[in-house]
Amino acid sequence: PWDCGPGGYQVGGFSPGWAEWNDRYRDTVRAYWKGDDGQIAELATRLTASGDFFNRRGRKPWSSVNFISAHDGFTLADLVSYNDKHNEANGEDNRDGHSHNLSWNHGVEGPTDDPEICALRARQMRNMLATLLFSQGTPMILGGDEFARTQGGNNNAYCQDNEIGWIDWDFSPAGRDLHAFARKLIAVRQSHPLLRRSRFLSGAYNKELDVKDVCWLAPDGSEMGEEQWQDGLSRCMGVLMDGRAQPTGIRRKGTDTTLLLIVNAHFDVVNFTLPEVVGGKGWRLVVDTNAPSPAEQPTFPFAHVYEVTGRSLLLLEVAS
């Protein structure tokens, strides 16, 4: 929905029934996990299907096609491995391709054997995939991103009919791990209608149902106020989605499990107080990008202070 020239950018301008690529989603999620300042409020809008673009003329959340990467630009693996594009093989002295990629190499440009950098890169890929699959809207995954396909830093590989542009189906060990994690994320999304609502989340209190469909939480467990929304250094928040909020908008209470999504783009641990909610006895951990293959799903009581690892994402569900 965009092109060069005056009036070429038309995201959100299509008629009801159309779904559109959402580049604002891409750029916001990249910038947030890179650690850029002032992203919290923007991220909240993108997580909830970008109502500023699509909540008009009867359009639905699925109108927003959310993505991290596409056929143009860096792959997900290259997004966490390169600060700059490396398109020399394209024969244009690296002049082709976009230079504004919102990427971060995490300390080394390109491949490395440094275990700390490799671990952080892997977690950042999990962070972005989890953000994508747990956002309202239509998720789009670039083929190969689910197993860390690389183009060696080439972000304009249309002309490379070779190993640069091909998909290698012989997964690396890291690729197999990411693939298993991506499958888990998809299964979680499929099992929770709350993550794929047909109506936009509003954050407004519904007196008839006695429920608020979404609350935005500060690390102390309280609802975020204007000061936190405006704090450019804020990088951690919780998204509390009430399972009683009917995802179709029908005037009866929903039956899905209440979910708590916590995102932390700080470099360090953030202590997050798990809120008390109706209909349960505590919280069960579903996904932790710092521990992608846990042996079990531990439960925590309400008011438990969870140490959220720096640069990680959690999804919890109410435990009955």
Image: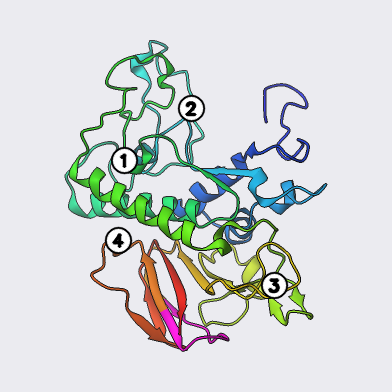
Q: How many marks?
A: 4
In primary-sequence order, the first of circles 4 and 1 is: 1
Badge 4 crowding class, 10 Å Cα cut-off, few under 14, some 14 to 19, many 20 or more, is some
**In the image, residue 226 lies at what x, y percent?**
69, 72
Q: Which residue is mark 4?
A: 292
Query: Which residue is rendered at x = 29% and y = 51% of the image?
Result: 180
Comparing labels 4 and 3, the label whose residue is closer to the camera: 4
In primary-sequence order, the first of circles 1 and 3 is: 1
- Check disc 2 and give the amino acid type: Asp
Decide: is 48 above or below 319: above
- Check disc 4 and give the amino acid type: Pro
For label 4, the SS is loop
Q: Is residue 243 left or right of residue 72?
A: right
Q: Which residue is mark 2?
A: 72
Image quarter of residue 148: top left
Q: Which mark is residue 140?
A: none
Q: Which mark is residue 148?
A: 1
Q: Main secondary structure of the magenta part?
A: loop
Q: Which mark is residue 226?
A: 3
